[in-house]
Image (cartoon, rainbow, N blue to C red):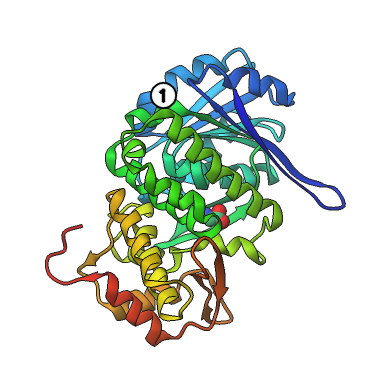
Amino acid sequence: MESLHIQRRGEALEFSYDIVWEKGFAGIAPCIRQLSLAARKACVVTDSQVGELYLPEIMEHLSGCFSQTDSFVFPAGEENKTLHTVQSLYEFLIGKKYERRDLLIALGGGVVGDLTGFSAATYLRGIDFIQVPTTLLAQVDSSIGGKTGVDFSKYKNMVGAFYQPRLVYMNMEVLRSLPERQFAGGMGEVLKTALIRDKSFYSWILENQAGINQRDPDLLSSMIRRCCEIKAAVVEEDPKEQGVRAVLNLGHTLGHAVEKLKDFRLQHGECVALGTSAAAYLSLKRGFISKEEYESVLRGIAAFHLPSHVSGLRAEEILQASKSDKKMESGKIKFILLHPLGRAVIDPTVSDEEILEAVRTIQKSGEDTI
Ligand code: GLY
């Protein structure tokens, strides 16, 4: 078993938990026992796709840890990341008499993790939860750091809470069967993570692109671990995004706008790649990165079969949609730029004209193909 500890201690201990990498789900039972939780009941929350693949197996491993184990399965898809699904989960937990010391386990990708975490944060004013991320995107980003929430009226992650899990348990074998497009989406967050903090890691990713695309287990382990180390360090410094954590939003302001305007038909990681491409262009225009570095960002996006252009959207509507994203401060978009490659800065001074110019670099005219 490999693990990484993440913790923050102010005057008191704010949070402390392990990120654990294993082959298979069997290791989850000993990890849970080590936590010495008071929980008697545990409810695995998952979606219809992931549930079909892994729910029976994980339920079997959990049965020895609790006096009661339940499962709550909701239909897969971003369109179900809503308060309506949360309400159904609350009703389920109330019906099964879940108490404050009981536990939720999020088995799935970002939608499942965010929704389960938010439900855990709010049910009975907060119960424990564990993340079991089953997509690359969730393993390198969304399961770590306690951002939880749901979409609201087409606004992405508009309602939520910062609420840390008690454990993040990753079964590396699930990546073998991950559909191509979901794997690529995860790579969008991997590239982002490297670009904001570690230039040599970014070069390593490009050098190993063939092996990563072939899902070489050793390369994936090293890659995921480095992403988790970077994310853990940022979250330990600024868990509630009062400052530096915003750098993790590289590519997200325009990315979220595209995601919303495309009615969530594009994957989150694909939209992050589009947003990263535009942010890299702005960084180039400001003189923060060189032309070669800008081209290396585009190469990274292409290497992992991510889109660098989007069709069927007007630049103005992308700009307007960006302005309704929650990453605004006093009406200004907090843009994340690269300065230089491998380091990100928060820039609230980017003008509408600059944003429109950057958006035009990712626009593709013609058919709405994606
Ligand atoms: N996904 C960005 C963050 O966790 O802050």
In the image, 121: left or right of 84? right
* Residue at the disc numbered 1: 54
The quadrant of the picture occupied by the C terminus is bottom left
Residue 180: horizontal and vertical position, in percent?
28, 39
The quadrant of the picture occupied by the N terminus is top right
Q: Foreground: 195 or 199?
A: 199
Residue 301: horizontal and vertical position, in percent?
33, 56
Q: Foreground: 99 or 195?
A: 195
Three-letter amino acid code of the residue under disc 1: Tyr
Residue neighbourhood size for the residue with mark 1, other residues' Cα within 10 Å, grouped as few (<14), some (14–19), many (≥20): some
Please identify the quarter of the rendering in which residue 15 is found.
top right
Q: Height in image: 65 above or below 253?
A: above
Identify the residue at the far left of this view.
367
Residue plotted at (64% across, 64% down): 244
Q: Height in image: 152 above or below 51?
A: below
Q: Can residue 88 be seen in this view?
A: no
Q: What element carries label 1?
A: helix
Please identify the quarter of the rendering in which residue 13 is found.
top right
Q: Foreground: 162 or 96?
A: 162
Residue plotted at (43% across, 53% down): 191
